[in-house]
Amino acid sequence: MRLVVDTNILVAEMLRKRGRALIRSQSLELFLAEKMKNEAQYELQKRISIIVNKGNFTQEEGQLELEVALGLINNRITTFPLYDYQSFEAEARKRIPRDPNDWETVALALALPAAIWTEDYDFFGCGCPTWTTQTLLLQINQ
């Protein structure tokens, strides 16, 4: 199954064992816009830092979690630069008017073509197939 991963879902699932297992699944071919990859890396660093500051991880555990997450992103998710999907910008912006910052995810899905893995309702009804984590888990575990 070919999926463009929404940044929010990527960050959330990278912090869960279930999510990392799903991302490792050979049933999934995962894609990400380069800008979204940079955002995900930033958010992961920020969230893991918060977890360390709360005392839920030691500094070393937090660093290891970050390294594992970033390694998984780099090894399992194909990243595309802007020029590969920029020609779909106008169409993507029309399809996702409530959150124009998400246009790159839609444009990449249109360019590949692929579905979108998301929990964000802004993507539902954009004309691209969408999958939630729960439906993906059900599909893969059949």
Image (cartoon, rainbow, N blue to C red):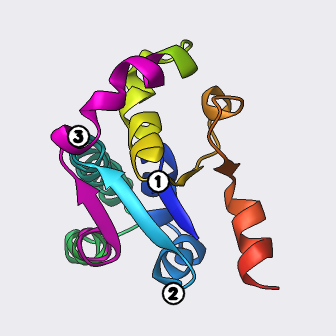
User: Mark 2 belongs to which amino acid?
Assistant: Gln
Q: Identify the residue position indicated by label 3 in the image.
A: 35
What's the magenta region?
69-93
In which quadrant will I find the N terminus? bottom right
Residue 93 versus residue 138 in the image, above or below? above
Residue 110 vertical placement versus 76 (above, below):
above
State the separation of the CA atoms marked 1 and 2. Answer: 15 Å
Q: Which mark is residue 53?
A: none
Q: Quadrant of the C terminus?
A: bottom right
Between residues 117 and 66, which one lies in front from this camera angle?
117
User: Which of the two residues, 78 or 56, is positioned nearer the viewer here?
Assistant: 78
Q: Amino acid at mark 3?
A: Lys
Q: How many marks do you count on the picture?
A: 3
Query: Which residue, given by chain and number where applicable, does mark 1 sit on?
Result: 5
Which one is earlier in the sequence, the residue at label 1 or at label 3?
A: 1
Secondary element under disc 2, as helix, strand or loop, is loop
Q: Which residue position is annotated with label 2?
A: 26
- Magenta segment, principal secondary structure? helix
Q: Residue at x 34, y 24 (%)?
A: 89
